[in-house]
Image (tube, rainbow, N blue to C red):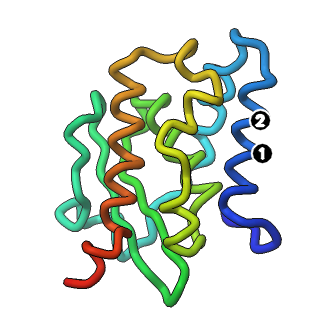
Amino acid sequence: MSDNVSTATERLNRIVEMFASAPKDLRLQALLDYSRRLPDLPDRLAGHPELFEVVPECQSPFALITERDGDAVHLYFRVPAEAPTVRGFAAILHEALDGAPADEILAVPDDFYLKMGLGEAVSSQRLNGMAAILRRIKSHLSPQQTQGS
């Protein structure tokens, strides 16, 4: 859930700092804890997997929708509970970025998750999937993409 008092960058930086300061052996546990925070899909989307864009670079089944409501961008992720690391990453993105303006999301460093120390907690294949998720979100929000929408 977004926190209207702070920016997406500030929310994300808090999460990054929390992970980075955690002992290496607790980072994976923290990611798994986040996996339980991913909100359920709204009823209007829950039964409609065809509306979601699949991110094929992810090792686990993963799909997303980005929606604009005025200046705010809302993120919806479809990821099974059996994929807790990528689900945890999705929950982090949702907590930090949902409701933020597109320019704030576009300003997120592409490799922010490396500063969290996740490279020591998950496989390089999972990291590649995480990078692909953020790239896909940004591609939906880039000015060239939105002109035709």
Q: Residue at x 50, y 58 (%)?
A: 40
Q: Residue at x 32, y 53 (%)?
A: 136
Task: Mark 1 and mark 2 in contact? Answer it, CB < 8 Å.
Answer: yes
- Type of amino acid at the residue the image marks with label 1: Arg
Q: Residue at x 73, y 55 (%)?
A: 11
In the rendered image of this protein, does residue 9 appear above or below residue 42? above
In the rendered image of this protein, does residue 40 appear above or below residue 25? below
Query: Could you say whether the residue bearing mark 2 is in a helix, strand or loop?
Result: helix
Q: Quadrant of residue 132?
A: top left
The percent coordinates of residue 25 (x first, y second) are: 69, 9
Q: Which residue is mark 1?
A: 14
In the rendered image of this protein, does residue 49 appear above or below residue 37? below
The percent coordinates of residue 112 (x first, y second) are: 57, 38
In the rendered image of this protein, does residue 124 appear above or below residue 41? above
Looking at the image, residue 44 sits to the left or right of residue 53; the answer is right
- Name the image quarter holding the N terminus: bottom right
- Type of amino acid at the residue the image marks with label 2: Glu
Q: Which residue is mark 2?
A: 17
Q: Residue at x 42, y 26 (%)?
A: 127
The percent coordinates of residue 32 (x first, y second) are: 59, 28
